[in-house]
Amino acid sequence: MKILVGSDHAGFGLKEKLITYLQELGYEVEDKGALEYNEEDDYPDFIIPLAREISQRPNELKGIIFGGSGQGEAMAANKFSDVRAAVYYGQGQCVVEEENESIIKLSREHNDANILSLGARFMTEVIPAILAKNIDDFKLRLGEIPSEFKFVHVDVLKEDVWAETELNFEAHLMVSHPEEIVELWVKRGATKIIVHELNEKINSFRGRVEIGLAVELHVPLEKVFPLVPKIDFLHLMSIATIGRQGDPLDERIFDRIKAVREKFPELCISVDGGVNKTNLEKLKNAGVDRFVVGSGFKDLWKSLTKN
């Protein structure tokens, strides 16, 4: 089976990753564009030719398309005969939790969908951050996380604060010598490790865990770019003073996101600090993939789950 894949700038990074993944699984994939990142492009230029081709060969081709919401893309595709595009927003977006994985199967089995339309800006990670004063505070903050969340961000300072948890987590090692404690946090179960400097010891854990490089606002991005091949994601700090919660988002972050996205359109970008319900959408549109949220999490969660 041949799969056609297309997207405008909103889903460009996801499209590039998906193509590699599908090819590794052995599928024949044809990239219908965009072939380079351009924030001025728009989905009809890519989705309409893709849908037209599937309409002409519905028994031979399937498609996966991306856009900001996936809705307009699906509507455009469904104008063509013999095209049935179904929209999916990713895990965690279904009201009925057990339908999360089966909804795509149902669209194929019951509706004979031949195009999957993905809303790239809805397929982002919102990750609650825990910055605890002591073990009791750590346990309290763990207990406050909504049951819908299975993954948290643990800020690690000089004092070792930890309690066993069934949640998956990433550890942000905000210490002078992260190589001294990285093995401890990997053994505790961290699936991602975030550091502010790379070294041989940190690099040796890549493969066992994902490695993220945290970059503070005062650090020139030009110093970071050569290190991108050694990491799995870039963790942009969006407040001037790290190690505390409650500071507002620094507007300089938007130019930094743009610079990274233009240089590395396929790179996963995290933002950490000052993220809340008022700036989440702007950050999404700028190209952020992962949002680490501390003091603004409760209000953000309410806004995302309101009727």
Image (spheres, helix red, strand yellow):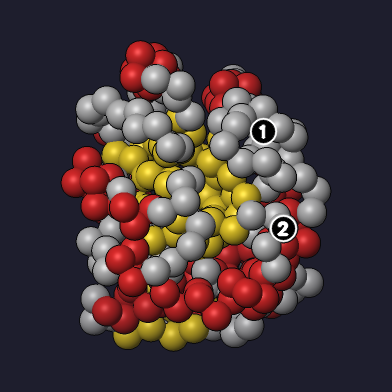
Question: Which mark, residue 276?
Answer: 1
The reply to whether residue 132 is visible in this rendering is yes
Quarter of the picture containing the C terminus is: top right
208 displayed left or right of 51: left
131 displayed left or right of 100: right
Pick the residue in front: 51 or 188: 188
Figure check: 207 above or below 132: below
Pick the residue in front: 62 or 25: 25
Pick the residue in front: 225 or 75: 225
CA–CA distance between discs 1 and 2?
Answer: 22 Å
Question: Which mark, residue 218?
Answer: 2
Figure check: 197 above or below 252: below
Query: x, y (%) of residue 170?
Result: 37, 45
Amino acid type at circle 2 is His
Amino acid type at circle 1 is Asn
Question: Which mark, residue 225?
Answer: none
Q: Tell which residue pokes out farthest to the left in this image.
A: 187
N-terminal label among 1 and 2: 2
Mark 1 or 2, which is nearer the eye?
A: 2
The reply to whether residue 58 is visible in this rendering is no
Pick the residue in front: 106 or 238: 238
**Which of the 4 image quarters holds residue 26?**
bottom left
Q: Judging from the image, what secondary structure is the residue with disc 2 in? A: loop
Q: Judging from the image, what secondary structure is the residue with disc 1 in? A: loop
Query: x, y (%) of residue 164?
Result: 23, 27
- Say few, some or many: other residues with alpha carbon within 10 Å of mark 2 (under 14 / 14 to 19 / 20 or more): few
Quarter of the picture containing the N terminus is: bottom left
